[in-house]
Image: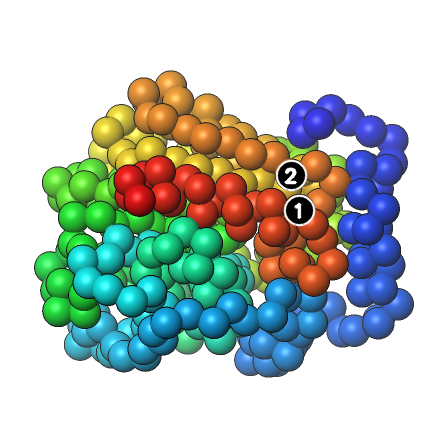
Amino acid sequence: MPGHTLRNPLALLTPTMHKVLERMHRAQKVPMHAMTPQQARAAYAGAAEVLEIPGQAVDRVESFSVTARDGYDIPVRLYAPTGAGLPTLVYFHGGGFTIGSIATHDALCRRLSHLADCAVLSVDYRLAPEHKFPQAQDDAWDVVQWLASKGAAYGLDPKRIAVGGDSAGGTLSAVCAILARDAGLHLALQLLFYPGTAGHQDTPSHRRFAKGFVLEEPHITFFFEQYIRSAADRDDWRFAPLDGLRPDGDVADLSGVAPAWLGLAECDPLVDEGLAYADRLRMAGVAVDLDIYKGVVHEFIKMGRALPEAAQAHAAAARALREAFAI
């Protein structure tokens, strides 16, 4: 269990997860932190579908752009069933604010749209190092606000909105939930797959799973160094909603934010901060549904070809969406 120290944390892995990691190790690819950000993006994109489930057919797929506050056109892709007045999940992909795209998370977004019978709006927010903190967060929030004000023109229900994402996308979602609360915008749910919520890699799980579990400590450092402008950004609540500070010097107040569903991987450096965020939400009176998937690693939701836990997490997330949207 998270928080329990084992002499050999590899013993926690499921047999199938162990085999997947062994195959990755035998491939002996250049580690991501040794690449340029551009090389890392290409490598991640090239491997995105290797373990992913085949793309689910959906009734409607439409690509367009949303204008950001600075005039930039943010690419988005809409996946939707037939009909109008559709509840919508705004989805932010993972990738340490540096890699990942609409394309790398296409199969996942298709799957969630199909299983939850809702629209999914996938967001290609701007990436680091070309665009530093807080650009990704600004883009994410701009798309949520656009959906609330103009989504009806695309057949979307502006009163039934959820935010969600994996890893860094989970960070963006959690912060958008706080911003929505502050703006008086009702969100039905925040859907967080192993979100990053802390500004420093100092929890026991960061030490326990620092090497050999897909997301390694050098990767996290690499991603953070691309995105943040200075060390001070680590302590900004928009980067670290768990323990970062607002301008008044206090941590973010979580009372009144949207209900949360969290899907965490047991063998993940981020698992402790995910648990801590769930605890903080509960202490603030927020309804929280927490699932911990035993014996799997960060990124497991994109390994559905190999891991049954991926399908289990997709189904649980879809149930949470359907309940939140009252479908």
Q: Label 1 sits on what residue type?
A: Glu
The answer to whether residue 174 of the structure is visible from this angle is no
Q: Which mark sits nearer the N-terminus, 1 or 2? A: 2
Going 47% across and 72% down the picture, which residue do you hit?
57
Q: Label 2 sits on what residue type?
A: Tyr
Labels 1 and 2 touching (C-beta < 8 A): yes
Where does the N terminus fall, quadrant-wise?
top right
Q: Please tell me whether residue 9 is drawn above or below residue 298 in the rendered image.
A: above
Separation of residues labelled 1 and 2 (CA atoms): 7 Å
Image position of 109 (left or right of 206)? left
Going 46% across and 54% down the picture, which residue do you hit?
115
Image coordinates for residue 145, horizontal then vertical, percent? 18, 57
Nearest the viewer among 116 and 203 is: 116
The answer to whether residue 87 of the structure is visible from this angle is yes
Nearest the viewer among 296 and 130 is: 296
Image coordinates for residue 272, horizontal then vertical, percent? 59, 33
Q: Please tell me whether residue 321 is drawn above or below residue 47 in the rendered image.
A: above
* Label 2 packing within 10 angstroms: few (<14), some (14-19), many (20+): some
Nearest the viewer among 292 and 215 is: 292
Image position of 106 (left or right of 123)? right
Nearest the viewer among 305 and 103 is: 305
Going 71% across and 45% down the picture, which residue do you hit?
296
Q: Nearer the viewer, mark 1 or mark 2?
A: 1
* Label 1 packing within 10 angstroms: few (<14), some (14-19), many (20+): some
Image coordinates for residue 150, horizontal then vertical, percent? 12, 64
Q: Secondary structure at mark 1?
A: helix
Q: Secondary structure at mark 2?
A: strand
Going 88% across and 67% down the picture, which residue do you hit?
26
On the image, numbered disc 1 is attached to which residue? Answer: 309
Residue 273 lies in quadrant: top right
On the image, numbered disc 2 is attached to which residue? Answer: 293
